[in-house]
Image: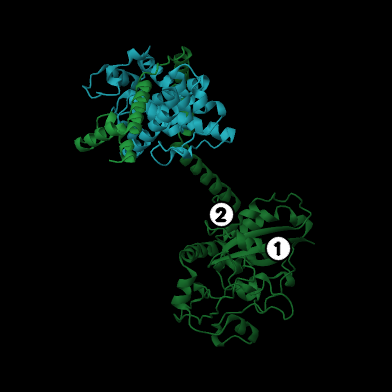
Amino acid sequence: MECDRVRALLSDYLEETLAEGDRAGVASHLDGCARCAAAAEGLAQTLTLLSALPRECAPPELLNRVMKGIAAEAPGKRGWTRFFTPPRVKIPVEAAAAVFLIVLVYGIQKGMPVRSGTPEGGGNPPAAERTIPDASPPLPAAVSSSPAKTAGKGPSTAAGKEKAARPILQRELSRTPMADAAGEVPPARSARAESLDAGPPPAGGKAEFRGAAAPIGRPAPAFSAAPAFTLAPAARVSSAEETIEPKVFAAPPSRLFKPLPYGRDVTLDVTPAERAGIEGKIVAAAERLGGGAHPGAALRPESAQPALAGTVRVHLPAEAADAFLDALRTLGTIPPEGMPAAVDLPAGPSPGITAYTVRIRVR
Amino acid sequence: MDSSATPRGGAPHGAGGAATRPVDVLLEAARRGRPGAFEAIVRAHQDRVYAFCSRMLSDREEALDAAQDVFLSAYRNLAGFRGDAALSTWLLKIAANRCLNAIRKRATRAGKETSFSGMGGGDGDDPSFEPRGRDEDRPDRIVEERELGTILLRALGRIDPESRSLVLLSDVEGLSYEELAEAAGLPLGTVKSKLHRARMALRKMLAPAL
């Protein structure tokens, strides 16, 4: 047995935990190797010294300090701090708190709190909202949306309009745009091509689509980029002939480089005497039609400066869009340049929902 | 109060026994919040724990703080002690971890590297092994010390903290290899080889005085 091997086994040899063969080999080597024998003797002395080290007594204050520490950790006192002392508890608690704070801040910024009175009741279109500048120029007039003609298509009374609008709203909310497009849309000309024709409507008045024709050379209004794949409203089904009007389908334009559609702009001229409280009346009109105010509008101090112009944003069921214009006319005057263009184009945060931005002018 | 007061149930060896050992009764009472029960446990083990911390840290105040932390940690985790090991073994395991953490923090504060790479290879009896450190820590200077105990403690302070912990737990406190492996979280073979290298290093440092 070589010296290195023997020295590696010296601890086991001295503790008598070696197998008999190894023990005999080490013993015979130590008999013949003075250097290894000296190493074994020195190791034995070291172990003896270690085991004979005098034990140091604890100072008296140790017991006092321990018992004071235990008293300080009484259940009442450590009930709160115990959540932050062991790392295995502290780290998950802090991580959960951080996630909660992030979600809370994100929710506040996105307007997650429940909006009462809004038709969609859930999703918020903040991105679309941001794309609509308040100082945008008046929108071009509709190519062929006659208020008189559109007004005659809805229910005759406000109560009737509300009754008709609410079920439709519920149905529209439960549908997705893709389902609409896949289930009912025949291949047809694009909405823009249809609108540029500007010709007379087909016989029987079934083709109701009138697209928004943006003036050439001028930037198109925001709502002109609205996806045109939403179908004609279900209320246009002729009850007498039980035929469905031909639908117009156009692929939605890319939203990558265009602002998202938010709603239709309409200008309402009021007199200074009519100005006070006009926002509330507009919202009330929307609510009668099954809609409501946009939460952003509700946050504004209503009529804080009644002499100045204001803006009110409301959401409505798509079927009540025309009726809402009629209601606005009872509150003020809609100038020709203030009429929304192409009221039969979808313009809202979701299919079936139409958003109006009513800009109040004091004349 | 002193080491002789260590209950039999807390002894390093022969800890197995009936469930009615005094230490078990004390533990159960301490778990129920009896104030005197844990005090009795502290009284029975404080010398052993403090001596271990003192030898590990070589500083009275640090040892006092460490021993206090050991007992407070034990008090908080009494429910987790299942009695598989002796109570003293459990306390010494906590003390070893606490002292090693303190040494790491101390090294971080001082910005020093406390690793002892010379201990890492070979069997510790390598003739090329030369303990590094201050001049007064060298073996030829250690010879000048009169008392072997002081020399041994100084030599203990020269080996790396983990090996020091193993030597103290094994050769001073009498823990078995299995208990060492469980306390250090290392395989049994690794513990035995590290312990042997540490002993041989101590022997080499003590050789001029022996």
Camera-side residue of A74 and B196: B196
Q: How crowded is mark 1: few (under 14 residues within 10 Å), some or many (20 or more)?
A: few
Query: What residue sits 49% from the left and 19% below the top?
Result: B145
**Mark 1 sits on what residue?**
A133
A167 w.r.t. B117: above or below: below
Palette colour of chain B: cyan
A179 w.r.t. B93: above or below: below
The picture places residue B47, in percent across and down from the top left corner, at: 40, 16
The picture places residue A160, in percent across and down from the top left corner, at: 53, 64
| Residue A169's disc number | none
Q: Residues within 10 Å of mark 2 (few under 14, many from 20)?
A: some
Camera-side residue of A31 and B114: A31
Q: Is mark 1 on a helix, strand or loop?
A: loop
Camera-side residue of B196 and A339: B196
Palette colour of chain A: green
The amino acid beneath tag 2 is Gly
Q: Residue furthest left?
A: A20
Q: Is mark 2 on a helix, strand or loop?
A: loop
Do the residues marked 2 and 1 share a common chain? yes
Residue B170 visible somewhere in the drawing: no
Whether residue A18 sits left or right of residue A259 in the image: it is: left
Residue B47 visible somewhere in the drawing: yes
Q: Which of marks 2 and 1 is in front?
A: 1
Label 2 with label 1: CB-CB less than 8 Å:
no
The picture places residue A310, in percent across and down from the top left corner, at: 73, 57
The amino acid beneath tag 1 is Pro
**Mark 2 sits on what residue?**
A117
A22 w.r.t. A240: above or below: above
Check the image and tell me how it is coloured: by chain
Q: Which mark sits nearer the N-terminus, 2 or 1? A: 2
**Looking at the figure, which quarter contains the N terminus of chain A?**
top left
Quadrant in which residue A315 is drawn: bottom right
